[in-house]
Image (cartoon, rainbow, N blue to C red):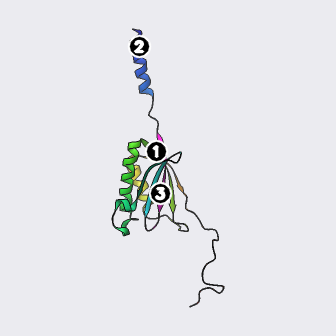
Amino acid sequence: MSEEMTEQIQEQKKETKKKRDIEAVMNIYTSFNNTIVHVTDLSGMTLAKVTGGMVTKHGRLKANPTIAMFIAKRIAEMLKESGVSSLYVQIRAKTGNPAPGPGAHSIIKSLTREGFKILNILDTTRTPRGGPKKKGGRRGRRP
């Protein structure tokens, strides 16, 4: 009798124990020439990395939103194998650009369709503050 009771209690504990959500950080770098997606766990170890050149053989299409959807599909397969279910997203554009490239939005959109939970979206684009001297001399470029 007591053995049966302990087995029932152990089964109930297994059912009530929830599966813990594994979180990861997704770094998306988008320029107008390429799209790079690098997924790490919270400690910084790489889980997956896919670029536009790994998906398409045409150089002109690497920054295309359609190719970005294929990148997201590959990333989703890799992350589901490792058990990741929620993501922190960091988007970075080329330094000085006002907006990220064409692939960033479609990657996030297709990952939410795949069932991933987006916890936070952060723009980490670097901004120049002065920088080196511009070319053109003291009086600037003249016609």
Label of residue 5 in the image: 2
Which class describes the residues within 10 Å of circle 3: few (<14), some (14-19), or many (20+)? many
Q: Secondary structure at mark 3?
A: strand
What's the residue type where badge 2 is placed? Answer: Met
Q: What is the x, y in percent for residue 113?
A: 38, 50
Extreme residue in the front direction: 45
Q: CA distance from mark 1 to mark 2?
A: 37 Å
What's the residue type where badge 3 is placed? Answer: Ile
- 123 sits left or right of 62 in the view: right
Which quadrant does the C terminus fall into? bottom right
What's the residue type where badge 1 is placed? Answer: Ser
Q: Secondary structure at mark 2?
A: helix
Q: Which residue is mark 1?
A: 86
Q: CA distance from mark 3 to mark 2?
A: 52 Å
* Proximity of marks 1 and 2: CB atoms separated by less than 8 Å: no
Which quadrant does the N terminus fall into? top left
Res 71 → quadrant: bottom left
Q: Does the segment drawn in magenta span residue 115?
A: no
